[in-house]
Image: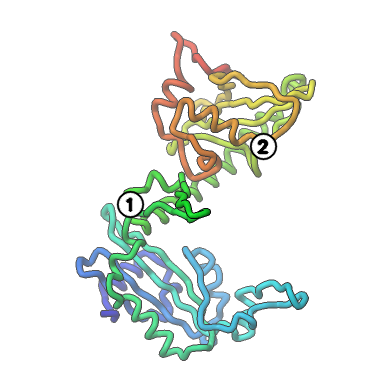
Amino acid sequence: MFNYNSDLEAILLSRVNANLLVGYLGGAFSQKNDKFYAATLVDISTIDYDDFAYLHEQVNGRSITNFDPELTRNYISNNSWHNKSVEECIEEGIYRYFSIIFTGIYFEQQWFIIKELCFYGDLKSEQAIKESIIKKSEYEDFWEQSIFRPQEPLTINRDGETITIRRVEMEEFKDNPSLVALLKQEKKEKINRLYNNYIEAEFIIPFFERLRINYSQRYQEFEALRVGYTTIFPEHKSYTLFCSLVKDADKNYALYYFLFDNRIRKFYKWTYFTPISFDFSFFYEQLIIEDLKQISHWDDIGFLDSSCTMDDEAFWDNYVFAHNGYHYTFLEEL
């Protein structure tokens, strides 16, 4: 039954911003009290939407329903248009209500909660919208839906053949409920992006600039694979491998790997692989994977620039930090 529950409200109040609970309708627990569904409904004409806009940008999903799509379009010509912004749709009264849906599951001794935002137009009354929100938790097998179960393989049908789409960034969470896996991967991706931005700006780019200045015959240009340089590091981030396609003074190109050891603030050239020379520049992601799959489980280009971390101790111990007496086998200090 979808109603007011003080225990459920207490869970939400201690874990989400109070503004997200404006218009709280109530919620429901599963029979074992290990899952919940709750919601709000807000008449936009009664609030200042500027107080909610930033919080709404942080939610996990967004949808629109009960509206005339024609009203949300700004036509450039008869056959082309662009969609109006949320602010425009609110100002013009196209969006009349919004609801935050909270879906939670208790896992690993904590609550994992997904927040989803839905805007509503005027094709249904407020009472009808409220009833449709409440009714969702009353559907048969609601508590058994896929979001509460481990993710199933993503497949598509192509020319009568079922093809599985690999999502390597989700593989480490494959035994978690989908809701949990989504939140864990999202958090890890944000942390890794911040780390990548920091390590590149603070250390990698200045390091490449020094090589270019001091050894211009060998290191004339460094080409990033995508927006930034590709990095490989364990979750603890004590050290970072990074690579670049390097052009020398003779206009030859080769893929070089380097290591920055955060613990001692030193740079090394990683020499496990022998660089192959090319007389042209190219998109070299497959070349990286062809190298890495020989000595690690990174066998798909999806690993590159993803939330995945290289947490295989054998990779680091045997192929990066291997010792020959007091000296590294595959690392040359630069």
Residue 290 locus on image (x, y percent): 54, 29
Q: Secondary structure at mark 2?
A: loop
Judged by depth in the image, the label closer to the viewer, 1 or 2, is 2
Residue 253 locus on image (x, y percent): 71, 26
List the single residue furthest toward the right.
250
Residue 102 locus on image (x, y percent): 38, 69
327 and 284: which is toward the camera: 284
Q: Which residue is mark 1?
A: 176
Q: Amino acid at mark 1?
A: Asn
Q: Is residue 54 above or below residue 124?
A: above
Direction from residue 14 to residue 325 in the image, left or right: right
Q: CA distance from mark 1 to mark 2?
A: 35 Å
Instruction: Tell me the quadrant of the picture where the C terminus can be found.
Output: top right
Q: Which residue is mark 2?
A: 283
Direction from residue 330 to residue 179 in the image, left or right: left
Residue shown at the point (59%, 34%) measured from the top left: 286
